[in-house]
Each structure stands twice: as structure tokens, then as C-alpha cells.
Amino acid sequence: MIHKRLQQPSGVFFIAWCLLASFGTYFCMYAFRKPFNTGLYEGLTLFGLGYKTVLIIAQVLGYMVSKFAGIKIISELRPEQRIRLVACLIGFALLALLGFALVPHPYNFFFLFLNGLPLGMVWGVIFSFLEGRRFTEILGMGLSISIIAASGILKTIYLEIQSLLPWITEFWMPFVIGLLFIPLTCLFIWMLSVIPAPSETDKLLRAERAPMTPADKSDIVRNFWPGLLCILLIYCLLTTLRDFRDNFSVEIWNEIGGNHWSRSILAQTELISTVIVVACVSCLSLIRNNIRGLWATKGLIAIGIIMTGASTLLYHRHAIGPYGWMLTLGTGLFLAYIPIQVALFERLIALFKLKANAGFFVYGCDAIGYLGSVGLLLYREFFMKDLRWSRVLMQFSYLLCFACLALLITAFVYFNRKHGIRNLFRKTEAPVTPNLHNFTIHL
């Protein structure tokens, strides 16, 4: 019954199934990745750094290595390998959390590197089930919702469990939360496994997505590198800001909200952002023309970038309070970040009929993005150690706003000209003479 209903790729059941499967799987992945950073690890240090900073850097380095590996592994992944790979990746991450719990400080930081090492490839496996379809922007919303909402919700879950079971230490808590999510993880992975391949109509509208060869990758980089470089730098800055805000949200709220802010505020702000971002990005699927879809996507990214800088300026001038700042900053950040993942590369592939998949582009951007995240953490620890976490967030928001707007305008001009030149060549090509020997008139 389920398989039969999923054969209607434009039906409500199919769309709802894909949304739930992608959201659930990626949300569960976050349960194996994010809960540790809710702990404060007060009084612990290593290498002259706060131990929480060491843990975050260790995991992000593993995540970054995973992204570099994903440029090859995800872009060349065959459909029959997907389910086995995602199950193995999450299982390995859980074993790493067990090692983090069992091995004492300060030697257990290495297990967070091992924890991040497989998890960076989960996004690409999930999105490979969704890309290349006429409603990819809508189907990708499951991933987007989990990216925005999961961290805040899991932080709230962590704090609630900690208050109910205070005897569970900060080192055991990530493993305990991971164990709780194992049954749900298995359910959602099964849901992914029964999603059918894109239909012929999907392939016609969005171009077929096949495993890439090294030659395919070289051709794309050689022909489109100026525009891709601009997008890569934008994504790097957005990833760095997103990661910093997420990893140190508890510390930032302690500074700007005092010691009496509610634990539920972490989930509340992210859920409101989720609703706004989902509504905006889903509308992109209504645009069937790929060049107009690309313009609309870049326009949405620009609005998000402006919101990050404007909200910080308003908070700096005391025009809005801490809650308004964190909510607007987060909403703007994800309005810029999510469309790059689920819409921008999707439109570029369809517009230029590239022999490519979104995993190749996103993993290249992610790899550099997490390198920037580590760089900001180290810069703060060595050169801005006395600066408050909220102050670092404000300064980087200003930098991101101006740099990303300049890069986005450059990319917009480049791809528009590239599309115009391609169309010019198509129009000036000599017409093809039909083969009359194979021409048949059907009466």
C-alpha cells in the first residue's frame, strides 16, 4: 500500500513522506552530534584552552574531514549504497560517544573527533533521495527544519534530562541521549529506503542526477570557478556564524539574558525561525523557470544577510532586546544559509544542465565552512580571550553582512552573464538538418 502511494511523486502523501523521513533522519543525527555542547565543562582546561572549546574544535575537525571525504564519496555514491552507509555512519558515531563517556578527561576529547568523522556525510546521503525532483525545494524542507530546530530542541531536552537525572555526568549525557534516539533513527532510515527514484518528468525539469566522475568535477570547476568561489566564501562565512551561535548559545544567553532566562527559549527561538524560513524557501518551488528561480533564491539569500547585520545594529543601539536580536539574527542567518543548500545548487544544475549532483557542491562548501568555524574559535581563544561571547557574535555579524553582500552581487552578475553567453551560442548555432531516411509520417 505504501509503495503504491509513493509512486505518485506529485501527491500529498509522497511529499509528506519525504518531508518526515528526511526531517526525522537528520534530526536523529543531531541527537548523536549536538547534545555535548550544552554542557559547560566548567573548570576544565587543555592546551591552555577551555575544555569545551577543545571538544568543539575536535568534533568540528572530524566533521570537516568528513566533508572533504564527502566531496568524493557522496558525489560518487550509488543509490544501492545509501542506506547501508547512513546506518554505519550513525552507529560509528554512537560508539564514539561511548568512548567519550568511558575515557576520563583530558584524553576523551579525541572521541569527539571520531564522533564528527562519520556524521558530516549524513546530510549528503539523505539529500540524494530528494534532489533532482520538481519539488526538491519543498522536499528539502525536512532537512532544513531539522537543521534549524534540532539543536535548540536537543539543548532543551539535555537540560530537562539533566534536571531530572542529575547523577548523569556531562560526559555520559551525549551517549544517553544517543541511545534514546536509536529506535526513531531506525524508523526514519527505513522511511528513506522506500522512497522511489525520480520520475521521467523530474529528470526532464531538473536534469538527471547521476554519480559523478573526476572528469565531471574538473569540467564544472574549470568552467564555473569564479561564481562558485563567491558562493563558497558566502557559505563559509554563514557556516562559521551558524556554528558559533549554536555552539555557544548557552554562554551567549547567560551574558545577554542574565541568569534567569528560561531553558525553553533555546527551542522557542529556533522553532519560530523554522516556520518563517520554511514558508519562504518552500515558495521557491512554485517558480518553474530555472533562471527566475535562481534570481528569487539569491534575493532570499540577500534578505537573510541584511537581516543578520540589521538586527545586530538594532540590538547594539538598544532598539531591540536580547530576545528580538537572537530571533531575528537566527532567522536571517537561516534565510541565507538554507537556500544555498536546498535551492541554489539545485537551480544551477538544472539551468546549465550540468552532469552533477548537489552533494558535490555542498560538500565542497561545507569543508571550507567548517575550517572557518575552527579558525574563528582559535582566533577568539588566542586574540579575543577577554571579549564576551556575545561581543564576538556581534562583530562577526557585521563582517559577514558586508562581505557576503559584495560576494553575492558578484556571483549574481557572473551567472547571469554566463547564462546569457550560453544562450547566445545556442541561438547562433547552425540549424540541424533532419535525417529524412528516418522520418516517418503517422496518419
Image: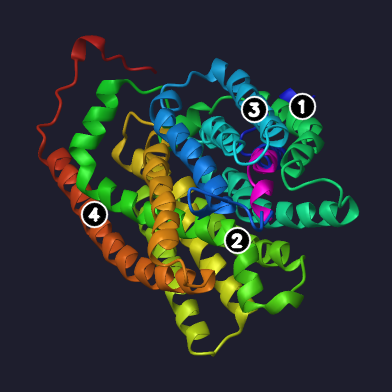
Proximity of marks 3 and 1: CB atoms separated by less than 8 Å = no
Chain-order first, disc 4 or disc 1: 1
Numbered mark located on residue 416 in the image? 4
Image x and y of residue 291, in percent: 33, 51
Q: As drawn, which residue projects farthest toward the right?
A: 164
Q: Is residue 202 above or below residue 443?
A: below
> What SS does tag 2 mark?
helix
Q: Residue at x 74, y 37 (%)?
A: 175
Image x and y of residue 352, in percent: 29, 39
- For the residues marked 3 and 1, what is the alpha-carbon distance in whole angstroms? 10 Å
Residue 119 seen in render: yes
Chain-order first, disc 1 or disc 2: 1
Residue highlighted by disc 3: 195
Look at the image and give the residue range highlighted in magenta. 26-38
Proximity of marks 4 and 1: CB atoms separated by less than 8 Å = no
- For the residues marked 1 and 2, what is the alpha-carbon distance in whole angstroms? 27 Å
Amino acid type of the residue that numbered disc 2 sits on in the rendered structure: Ala
Dominant secondary structure (helix, strand or loop) of the stretch shown in magenta: helix
Chain-order first, disc 2 or disc 4: 2
> What SS does tag 1 mark?
helix
> What SS does tag 4 mark?
helix
- For the residues marked 2 and 4, what is the alpha-carbon distance in whole angstroms? 26 Å
The coloring applied to the image is rainbow
Amino acid type of the residue that numbered disc 1 sits on in the rendered structure: Ile
Number of numbered tags placed on the structure image: 4
Residue highlighted by disc 2: 279
Residue highlighted by disc 1: 2
